[in-house]
Image: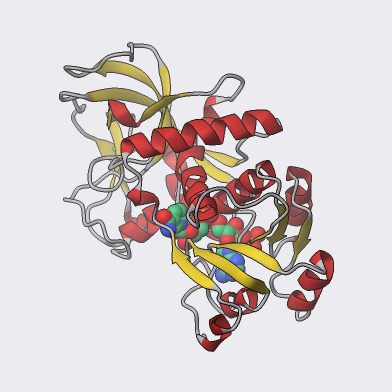
Amino acid sequence: MRAWLLDSFNGVENLRLTDVPDPAPGPGQVLLGIKFAGLNPADAFLAKAQYPAKPVFPHVLGRDGVGTVLAVGEGVTGIRTGDTLGILRCDAGVESWGTLAEKAVIPAVSLAHVPPGWTPEQMAGAPLVFLTAWQALVQWGGLPPAGEVLLVTGASGGVGVASVLLGKSMGLTVVALSRSASKARHLLELGADHVFDPASPSLRKDVLAAIAPRKVDLIVDSVAGPLFAQVVAMLGYGGRISVVGRSGGPVPEFNTASLFFKRNRIGGVAVGDYTPEGAQAAWTEIVRRLESSGKRPVVDMVFAFEDVKKAFDRLSDGPMGKVLVRVA
Ligand SMILES: NC(=O)c1ccc[n+]([C@@H]2O[C@H](COP(=O)([O-])OP(=O)(O)OC[C@H]3O[C@@H](n4cnc5c(N)ncnc54)[C@H](OP(=O)(O)O)[C@@H]3O)[C@@H](O)[C@H]2O)c1
């Protein structure tokens, strides 16, 4: 099969497309013929050793994808050759070979059917970011109460779009931040109640005026950087911030006193913490919510398999939804 190999921690620019022997499924595993792979910033971080996983080289990146079942290993039940299945967050692309290859071996417990009415493309990039957004929203003790105000930074990205869609499905008022006017329009179409440019000098005043007399109850932050302190300052009493990522770099200065008097809380999010069973349960609920609200995951662009490096460039430029690669 053809696969994009990572030979060292020299970044995705140095991936190499080559022929390698086909993998075979072991007990409890399934061999998928990959149709679409979904990219995530963590792939690029792993390729530069900026991620906890340190796989054996050569490695194949790619944590998300959809494929056709080519073979099943011993003990696998309920999955048949020819089924089209998507991958829920697992070790593929982290410690074992992932989806930037024509074939991938995936644990049967981490596979899910493409929901009725979804295209394979919509499924391919959705699981990792929706599972992340789900954890970010419910980690504070279950569903946030309807009517609360959710603020989403990096709202046009994979985790951002998922947070907006899930937040609306929970009856939250959603304030989205995006640096791009065209992406802002798209976010309003997806259901965001308000969209603001994070670079605006009047950001705090504008957000608080839009949601008055409330303040922000919950933030899903995937940007960090200098924006972090600004959004924390918009939290009301008992407000919480789920820390997902740091697309905007490290937080340069943060005064912890800003947390004291409003009893604000900061909590990290780790999609790697899901057990296979936990991921399946959360995924079922995510699909149910998208179904009831008539929404679908958003695909930004689909690149040819040979253009994986261009796809990573698009991801680092800031997509609107998910960047995919058509493998077969
Ligand atoms: N903790 C976890 O388990 C977990 C899971 C998934 C992802 N993550 C992390 O979360 C972050 C976002 O992931 P993603 O998949 O949503 O990424 P993404 O699809 O690349 O989207 C990130 C969005 O953030 C905005 N952004 C990028 N750079 C920025 C900057 N310098 N300043 C302000 N905004 C910026 C962009 O939106 P605009 O252009 O519209 O402003 C972009 O669309 C990444 O760091 C990723 O590694 C963590």
Task: Please provide percent x and percent y for residue 30.
Answer: 27, 23
33 over 93 or under it: above or below: above
Residue 49 is at least partly visible in this image: yes
Residue shown at 45%/44% (left/top)? 128
Which image quarter holds the C terminus?
top left
Task: Please provide percent x and percent y for residue 69.
Answer: 34, 18
Q: Is residue 21 left or right of residue 48?
A: left
Residue 88 is at least partly visible in this image: no
Task: Please provide percent x and percent y for residue 318.
Answer: 59, 57
Q: Is residue 257 left or right of residue 49?
A: right
Task: Please provide percent x and percent y for residue 166.
Answer: 62, 44
Q: Is residue 272 left or right of residue 58?
A: right
Residue shown at 16%/23% (left/top)? 27
202 over 97 or under it: above or below: below
Colour mode of the rendering: secondary structure
- Comparing 208 with 262, the one in front is 262
Q: Is residue 44 left or right of residue 211?
A: left
Residue 211 lies in what quarter of the image?
A: bottom right
Residue shown at 73%/68% (left/top)? 197
Which image quarter holds the N terminus?
top left
Residue shown at 31%/44% (left/top)? 93
Residue 89 lies in what quarter of the image?
A: top left
